[in-house]
Image (tube, grey):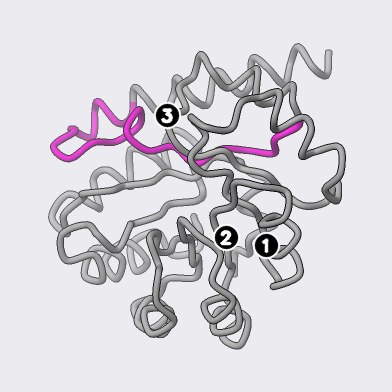
Amino acid sequence: MLNWQQAFAACPLVAILRGITPDEVIPVADALLHAGFRLIEVPLNSPDPLTSLQRLAAHVGEEALVGAGTVITPERVAEVEQVGGRLIIAPNLDTRIAREASTRGLVYGPGVGTVSEAFAAIEAGAAFLKLFPAEAISPAAVKAMRAVLPETTPLLPVGGITPASMADYLDAGVSGFGLGGALYQPGSTPGEVARRARAFIQAHADWASTANP
């Protein structure tokens, strides 16, 4: 079974499919998988998200790790697990959700915006930290956070990330990204998603080749 470490090592980019419908999720997922994505999130404020997630989990099998975003109550954790989701991603830190995810062996990634929140999330067992909203957390701020946080804790800015903005954050020490509207918006065709996905993959590869010549 593909675990978090394997999926993240393969591609440290999380596709956030906010607003996707059950009928759209499979062709969009295929476009993402073909581009190289291995982490896919269906936010729970999407239309019929559990049906989308169930279809997604069954379709991708061992090719990707999938789960839900915008998980803001502990009761939703069990619902996500029941349909095959293994990622529990939230805009905020909630220790109740952290405990529920840990009990079920699921991967928890809470949103944090300060060093205090980051350390609290690490203490709660977060597998990674979602730096949210990234529009309010500059690369300079990330660099300062990275200097005091454990090197092994993945930092993923989320919110407003584009291929052009990735390099500055990577230089500051982030580990990957959550990608929303610049990758997928309601109504995006699989072809459009594929083109955008390739642009993100290429931007990350270009930075990696420069950072590690």
* Residue density around tag 3, few if under 14, some if 14–19, many if 20 or more, within 10 Å: some
Number of the label disc, if any, that sits on residue 109: 2
Q: Position of residue 109 (x, y in %)?
A: 57, 60
Secondary structure under tag 2 reads strand
**Which of the pair 44/115 is nearer the observer?**
115
Q: Position of residue 58 (x, y in %)?
A: 34, 69
* Residue density around tag 2, few if under 14, some if 14–19, many if 20 or more, within 10 Å: many
- Real-space Cα separation, disc 1 to disc 3, in angstroms: 22 Å
User: Which residue is the site of mark 1?
Assistant: 127
Q: What stretch of residues is rendered in magenta?
A: 173-194
Marks counted in the figure total 3
Q: Name the residue type under label 1.
A: Ala
Q: Which quadrant is the C terminus positioned in?
A: top right
Question: Residue at left 43%, top 52%?
Answer: 40
Q: Are marks 1 and 2 in contact (CB under 8 Å)?
A: yes
Number of the label disc, if any, that sits on residue 160: 3
Q: Name the residue type under label 3.
A: Gly
State yes or no: residue 179 in magenta: yes
